[in-house]
Image: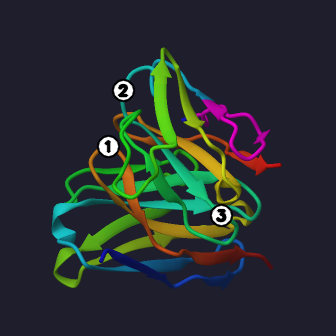
Amino acid sequence: QSALTQPRSVSGSPGQSVTISCTGTSSDVGGYNYVSWYQQHPGKAPKLMIYDVSKRPSGVPDRFSGSKSGNTASLTISGLQAEDEADYYCCSYAGSYVVFGGGTKLTVL
Amino acid sequence: EVQLVESGGGLVKPGGSLRLSCAASGFTFSSYSMNWVRQAPGKGLEWVSSISSSSSYIYYADSVKGRFTISRDNAKNSLYLQMNSLRAEDTAVYYCAREAVTYIDYWGQGTLVTVSS
């Protein structure tokens, strides 16, 4: 049940694209297509942005996309906007447990 | 509209106990697995426990196994977390969260638990 590995921070200018990686093991990220991504603004509850690796819930802009290769999942945000500045967490279902990444702070310059 | 409202947080001494509750509304509670997820101040999210819709399957993080007990009452649309032998490192905001089989789709606003003497 070790936490998934994410970069502590990423940044980009408005209009640019950024990608956040999430590395696990063959027991979690690599073993299931059940990676989800959450956005969290300060003092707020997390919000689902991507589920099952690449699916977007209704209401989430198509600027947000997800992918996976082996034991590493990625969240890409294109056309960065000021309101995208937040913490982002990946998550993997792994059968009998759930594991989150350590979180990545996205700064929009 | 899905609503999850946690309650029961507060200040407790190390070694003490606390019971968190989560009142669910806006969906058929008895059809969904539920989770507790916590977040220590300034830290990331940590999954704590999950319970299936009929309470048949219950899982815990290693960090709380043997100390915390998750339960639910489908007649009352409520989820619970009994926390015993609390430690300073259990200090966190505790979120109640609905599970959509392979991911968490809705979160409550959280309740703060502080373990301190």
Considering every residue shown, the one lying at the far front of the view is: A15
**Image point 56% across, 25% down: which residue?**
A24
Q: Which residues are magenta?
A: A2-21
**Residue A32, numbered label:** 2
Instruction: Tell whether label 1 touches label 2 (CB within 8 Å).
Output: yes
Report which quarter residue B71 is drawn in: bottom left
> Taking B77 as reference, is A95 above or below it?
above
Amino acid at the residue labelled 1: Thr
Q: Is residue A80 magenta?
A: no
| Location of residue B70 by image quarter | bottom left
Camera-nearest residue between A81 and A20: A81
Asked if marks 1 and 3 fall on the same chain, the answer is: no
x then y, percent, for residue A34: 37, 34
The residue under label 1 is: B102
Mark 1 Cα-neighbour bin, 10 Å: few <14, some 14–19, many ≥20: some
Same subunit, labels 2 and 3: the answer reads yes
Judging depth in this view, the residue of A58 and B3 nearest the camera is A58
> What's the colour scheme?
rainbow
Q: Is residue A7 magenta?
A: yes
Q: Is residue A29 visible?
A: no
